Image (tube, rainbow, N blue to C red):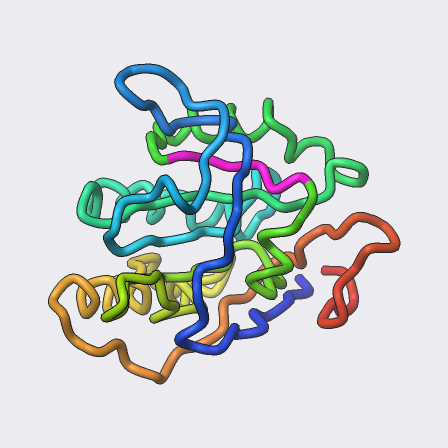
Amino acid sequence: MAVTPSTMLPLGEALPAFRLPVVSGGLRNGVAAATLSDSELPPQPLLLMLICAHCPFVKHVEPELSRLAEHYSPEVTLLAISSNSLITHPQDGPEGLRHQAEQRQWRFPYLLDEQQSLAKALKGACTPEFYLFSPNEAGLQSLRYRGQLDGSRPGNDQPLDGRDLRMALDAVLNGQPVSGEQRPSVGCNIKWHPGQEPPWFGAPA
């Protein structure tokens, strides 16, 4: 199975501005929000997860994403984002994402990046891909970790335990520096709109 690695956005990068539709989760006072923006997020650690509904690499890690949400919420804000082109992959549209979230009983917001602007601002390359931000001394969200969940991949028999990401989350929550030894995630490439592929796009996976 061909794989695409993360581009590994430089640490310390600021959280890109965004306002995206919410297709699942994200209840506010019991009412589903239509959109969510970066300015509406609480001043605490933020985990962005570039995922989608159809990717076998994402399906492989879904159980651990559920465990992460259970373990780290509400101290960490979790946001799932799907940026795949609905032109080429309509199965990653709102209905498919809602079904995925319902199957896994995810309560965190699932956002649809239909214009792919957030994925490009993050220099996203694959699904799944993870970005952990936390407020810096100025109170601005700053990138602390990007890369893999752990070493588990479909068929490689390594434990799906979120080891790498959990170590980063624990460090941030304990006010400690995150290790700079961070490994790229790998997975299916993000499905860019035809003719709008970013410079870092390689051969399709």
Give the quarter of the image for residue 115.
top right
Image quadrant holding the N terminus, namely: bottom right
- In the image, is 93 to the left or to the right of 67? right
**Residue 126 visible, this angle:** yes
What residue is drawn where x is 59% and y is 60%? 121
- Give the answer, above or below, for where 135 lies relative to 98: below
Q: Is residue 113 left or right of residue 41?
A: right
- Give residue 78's quadrant in the image: top left
Quadrant including the C terminus: bottom right
Q: Nearer the viewer, residue 179 or 11?
A: 11
Q: How many marks?
A: 0
30 and 127: which one is in front? 30
Q: Which residues are magenta?
A: 109-114
Given residues 2 and 65, the one toward you in this image is: 65
Q: Is residue 110 magenta?
A: yes
Most distant residue in the left direction:
174
Write the residue at 45% across / 35% down: 36
Q: Quadrant of residue 12?
A: bottom left
